[in-house]
Amino acid sequence: MSNAIVSREADHERKARLILVHPSGCPEIIRTLPYLIDPPGVFSSTNSWIRFRDKTLLPMMRHDPNDPNLPNFIRQVELILTWRAAVPVEDRFWKE
């Protein structure tokens, strides 16, 4: 087997492991949600996660500051953004 094939297989394995450890977009839910919320997926761009936070979650928090779940969703998005920033560019598997 050539070095290029071995290197490509190692690259695929490394990215597959990263996909498995990518933080979930859904935090622990405190009680039944009175709304449907659909976070971006693992393969969604980082900009999609930022827009989700800025255009969906933050306005929802302003509308209902007592909702116990919204801060958890925002913390989860921040965790995802921090995690993604730490992944080397060559290992990023999501859309940009």
Image: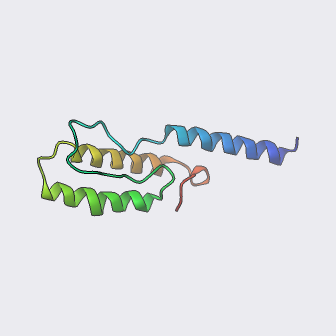
Q: Is residue 52 above or below residue 14?
A: below
For the image shown, how many numbered marks are present on the structure? 0
Q: Quadrant of residue 24?
A: top left
Here the colouring is rainbow
Percent coordinates x, y for residue 48 in the rendering = 41, 60
Q: Quadrant of the N terminus?
A: top right
Q: Nearer the viewer, residue 69 or 8?
A: 69
Residue reaching furthest to the right: 1
Percent coordinates x, y for residue 28 in the rendering = 30, 36
Percent coordinates x, y for residue 11 in the rendering = 69, 45
Residue at 56% from the left image edge and 52% from the top image edge: 92
Percent coordinates x, y for residue 86 in the rendering = 48, 47
Report the side of 59 relative to 5 (left or right): left
Report the side of 38 relative to 5 (left or right): left
Residue at 57% from the left image edge and 52% from the top image edge: 93
Q: Nearer the viewer, residue 38 or 8?
A: 38
Q: Is residue 14 above or below residue 96?
A: above
Residue at 40% from the left image edge and 51% from the top image edge: 81
Report the side of 5 relative to 20 (left or right): right
